[in-house]
Image (cartoon, rainbow, N blue to C red):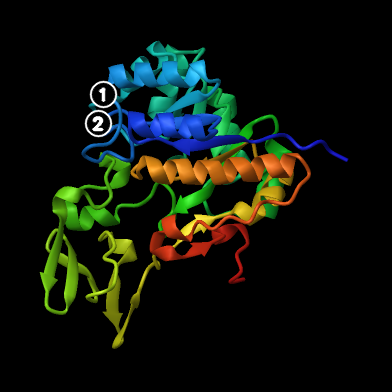
Amino acid sequence: MTELIRPELVCPAGTPAALKSAVDAGADCVYVGFRDETNARNFPGLNFNRKELEDGIGYAHARGAKVLVAINTFPRAGHPEIWHAAVDDAARLQADAVILADIGLIDYAARTHPDLRLHLSVQAAASNPQAIRFYAERFGVRRVVLPRVLTVPEIAAINAIIAPIETEVFVFGGLCVMAEGRCALSSYATGQSPNMNGVCSPASHVRYVESGHGITSQLAGFTINQFGLNEPAGYPTLCKGRFIANGKTSYLFEEPTSLNTLTMLPDLIKAGVTAFKIEGRQRGRAYVAAVVQAFRAGIDAVMAGQPVPDMDLDCITEGGRQTTGAYEKAWR
């Protein structure tokens, strides 16, 4: 019988407080971003300046945890300076790895900092052995974050072919209807997209309009959703808006729901996944602590040969609903 490898638990931290919460709750790794457009969660009030990251890395390392820096947007043509500076500073501050998507930036990091560990962001959308091997053989990429479009058997098959290249998969958090790294939908309304500017539906373009019938959410002047008086009002992103089509009102692209794979942890571990990633750098420290504690307990239980504990995470999932997403592809 093949011995199971304990996967790393990779957890989000949008602020120094969230980093401490993740580490204290049992994270093996914490991923963060700089406070600029080099990362795909470039929202006001989030992310780290250089001194905060230095302190955060010190806090994590003192407790046996690693810090990964997401530099996962695509540089502006002819102006890669701030992206290069982000890689340089991550290396200088002794980050354990950088998470990159742009092939030119990966090349820069590999040439300039040969000792810096490179992870391939999900934004690069490498979902087959040939693409993964290209990045590993050409640039020395050590780990690939797989897109959320693969079943567990497909992941196992990829791992069997690409070893010892590591794979990381998302296990909890928000989903996206778009192909990883290809979303430009937000830019049609706001002029800004997550892949280039690090923002999907930026807060500066969001408005909530109250009336006697409830609340209307708007993005750059476009109505995205309408909520009743007692209905929670969600954040207005275009792909999760409620629209009228053929006389029927529905979530046309994607319903608000969260990925939750707690019950699938044994299968993902058997599939040879190296690391489990929790989404949510824009979430608060309470969310981070709760999810990290749940998945820490789940992983520890599986590795001890015990069943995964039954834990209710409905209160922190999007729309109070959960799915296993493409991992099972129940719609086939």
The residue located at (46%, 65%) in the rendering is 321
The residue located at (70%, 54%) in the rendering is 153
- The quarter of the rendered structure image containing the C terminus is bottom right
Q: Secondary structure at mark 1?
A: helix
Percent position of residue 300, x then y: 68, 39
| Amino acid type, mark 1 | Ile
Q: Are marks 1 and 2 in contact (CB under 8 Å)?
A: yes
Q: Secondary structure at mark 2?
A: loop
* Residue that carries the numbered disc 2 in the rendered image: 36
Percent position of residue 303, x then y: 73, 39
Which residue in the rendered view is the most extreme toward the right?
1
| Amino acid type, mark 2 | Asp
- In the rendered view, would you say 76 is above or below 140? below
Percent position of residue 250, x then y: 34, 78
Which-is-in-front pick, marks 1 and 2?
2
- The quarter of the rendered structure image containing the N terminus is top right
Residue 47 as seen in the image, left or right of residue 262: left
